[in-house]
Image: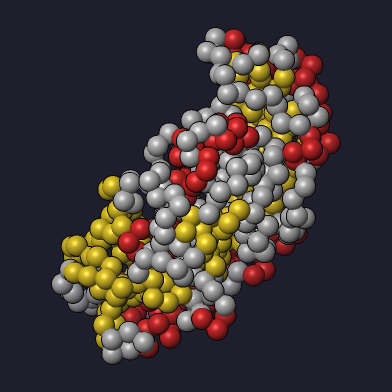
Amino acid sequence: MLTQERAREIFEIVRRHSTGDGVEAIIAGGRSALTRFANNTIHQNMAEEQYQLSVRVLFGQRTARATSNKLDEESIRRVVQAAENLARVQQPDPDLLPLAAPELATGGPAAPARSFPATSAMTPEERAAAVDKIVAVARRNQLTTAGVVASSHSAECILNSQGLFAWHEQTLAEVSITMLGEDSSGWQKATSPDLTVLDPEMLAEIAARKAMQSAHPRELAPGKYTVILEPAAVLDLMGFMFFDFGGQAILDQRSFLNNRLGTQVFGENITIYDDVYHPLQAGSPFDGEGVCRKRVQLVVRGGVKNLVYARHTAEKMKKSEYAARVGRIEPTGHGLPLPNEMGEAPMHIVMDSGPPSAHRTVEQMIAETERGVLVTRLWYIREVDPYEKILTGMTRDGTFYIEQGRVRHGIRNFRFNESLVRMLNSVEAMSAPVRSSGEESFDMVVPAMKVKDFNFTEVTKF
């Protein structure tokens, strides 16, 4: 496993072979393992350990990056040489800043512990035991199951010739389960740095219940319905809008917020922030230049209050026509490794669904719904109109008809066409936020949502 001492040794070799005005290295990687199962049987075990060295050099206003997955001295020399060869032929970038100073890597709150021995030490036998519990639930309910049980232990380190050093170490466990009936399916997925908080058997029971309750699905006419979106469905939709909250997206005029800054964009019950330090979050407390991440309040009661910035984007934004409309402008520690064309993005989203007294469980939302649709998750989501944030995609693995406060039966899946802006102006109720995982976006801490007039446009054949 990579250690801080080994990372410093690698960087000393990088420095020894570098002739640039400045040099930066990102060293990342670790161990990962998974057990994959299908048809109630394990069919794949995999384990690997790998690391990557990414070197960026500067010659005046020119910069470039090269990457290698070999860490012997000759390979390190070659990757430094490759980065320098590329940098020398680049066009000068007038916005390029010097490498980040060491003090920019500090100053944030203490990051929660995210490296757990139980996760790091998970064995193939333990993964097989988890799969055995899942398969037992499937067999007891005359279903078949497929999915993944996985764990990893990784480290990430950024060092530069200004003396900056930032280090993050983390474990992550994942359980993903699909239960299959003759004409129905159910699904559940969870991730956490701490393996011990995951309960494969409980996830399997929920997935199995969804598969059985959605058996013999009936067809419901397309149209606008009150919809209850479970957290996985919420995050896979919302993930399409957060790259628009980067300062570079505004400067490039490719954000749906460009002409909405300073206006009421969403409903007053929508408040969102980015917080890598939240106890349910995961990830490193520094960005692609080693700058310490800050907690940023993105949306307050429906209004966009702040954006996130890399160092150079903050400098450009201060001189732009948007400066008076975008809240506080400062580096927030959300930059991607340079050089890049994207700038920055908030990737540790937490949605505030109000005080506990306002929370409604999914069961309460169902009980308070006269006629609607319950959605477990969504897939194949694509953007139709980036400015209006209109998305299309399909429901999957458990779609149900609600009538008079009860789930009546499973229904055939729908294709939807819906605007995120409109949807977040139509939220009638939310649950407590939970850490959630999907397949189309990164993990977030989000609630389930009850949304009125969600637009289903077509019934699928399954």
Tell me which residue sits at (26%, 82%) in the image: 371
Name the side, left or right, on which 84 lies relative to 217: right
- How many numbered discs? 0
Q: Position of residue 123 (x, y in %)?
A: 67, 58
Q: Nearer the viewer, residue 444 or 270?
A: 270
User: In the displayed structure, would residue 382 be above or below residue 87?
Assistant: below
Name the side, left or right, on which 28 lies relative to 399: right
Q: Position of residue 14 (x, y in %)?
A: 74, 21
Q: Nearer the viewer, residue 461 or 337?
A: 337
User: In the displayed structure, would residue 377 be above or below residue 250?
Assistant: below
User: In the displayed structure, would residue 67 be above or below residue 267?
Assistant: above
User: In the displayed structure, would residue 403 be above or below residue 173?
Assistant: below
Q: Nearer the viewer, residue 383 or 122?
A: 383
Quarter of the image that includes the N terminus? top right
Q: Position of residue 408 (x, y in %)?
A: 28, 85
Residue pushed farthest right?
Answer: 5
Residue 408 in sight here: no
Residue 56 location, quadrant: top right
Q: Position of residue 190 (x, y in %)?
A: 53, 64
Tell me which residue sits at (28%, 68%) in the image: 454
Colour treatment of the image: secondary structure
Quarter of the image that includes the C terminus? bottom left
Residue 129 in sight here: yes
Tell me which residue sits at (66%, 13%) in the image: 59
Tell me which residue sits at (57%, 80%) in the image: 356
Residue 10 location, quadrant: top right
Residue pushed farthest front?
Answer: 324
